[in-house]
Image: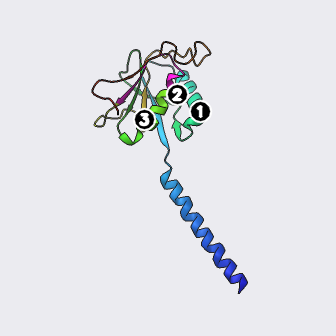
Amino acid sequence: MIFCRAALIALGGGILLSATSADAQMNSRRVDVDFVITRDGVQTETVTSLSQTLQSMSQLDDIYFWSTPDRVNTSSKQEVQIVYSDAVLRSDVLRVRDALAGLVTNRVCVIYAPDGHAEGLGDINVHLPQRVDQVVLLGGRGPGAGMQNCLEPNQAVS
């Protein structure tokens, strides 16, 4: 009798743990960030370096940074552009923006395009210019030196 009661309690606990585990998986989501570069632009070593550095940051542990970039025909000439189309991702985008701003001296822009066509495969697309200034990443000037964040006109996130 005691054995049966213990078995039922263990079985009930296992079901409860399974349900809790399933809820945790449903509530936790992985956000994918895809780097987008021009076909003849940024070297893939830059993307690999940035993605590895960002992936190692503990404040971004729920975000996955792809190290192989998507290639498109055009991109910004100077600034890093972070483009997203789902308002739910706003806080993730701002964390990515802040982390990137500490690694490059290029201006980092956030573009919310709810009706936009996503060019990369990720939830968040980071369009890199042809020249990424990684002075900060390579041990040069400190974070924030000569750096500006921007929101594109009429695309501001609130």
Residue in the picture at 69% in, 78% down: 6
Residue 124 x, y percent position in the rendering: 42, 35
Residue 76 x, y percent position in the rendering: 38, 19
Instruction: Please state which amino acid type lies under the numbered disc 1.
Output: Met
Residue 126 x, y percent position in the rendering: 43, 28
Marks 1 & 3, CB-CB < 8 Å contact: no
Q: Distance between the residues labelled 1 and 3?
A: 17 Å
Q: Which of marks 1 and 2 is nearer the N terminus?
A: 1
Q: Mark 1 points at which residue?
A: 57
Q: Which residues are drawn in magenta?
A: 99-111
Q: In which quarter of the image is residue 41?
A: top left
Asked whether residue 131 appears in the rendered view, the answer is yes
Q: Is mark 1 on a helix, strand or loop?
A: loop
Q: Mark 2 points at which residue?
A: 99
Q: Which of marks 3 and 2 is nearer the N terminus?
A: 2
- The quadrant of the image that shows the N terminus is bottom right
Q: Nearer the viewer, residue 116 or 151?
A: 151
Q: Is residue 54 left or right of residue 150?
A: right
Q: Mark 3 points at which residue?
A: 124
Q: Does the magenta stretch include residue 133?
A: no
Residue projecting furthest to the front: 158
Q: Which of marks 1 and 3 is nearer the N terminus?
A: 1
Asked whether residue 122 appears in the rendered view, the answer is no
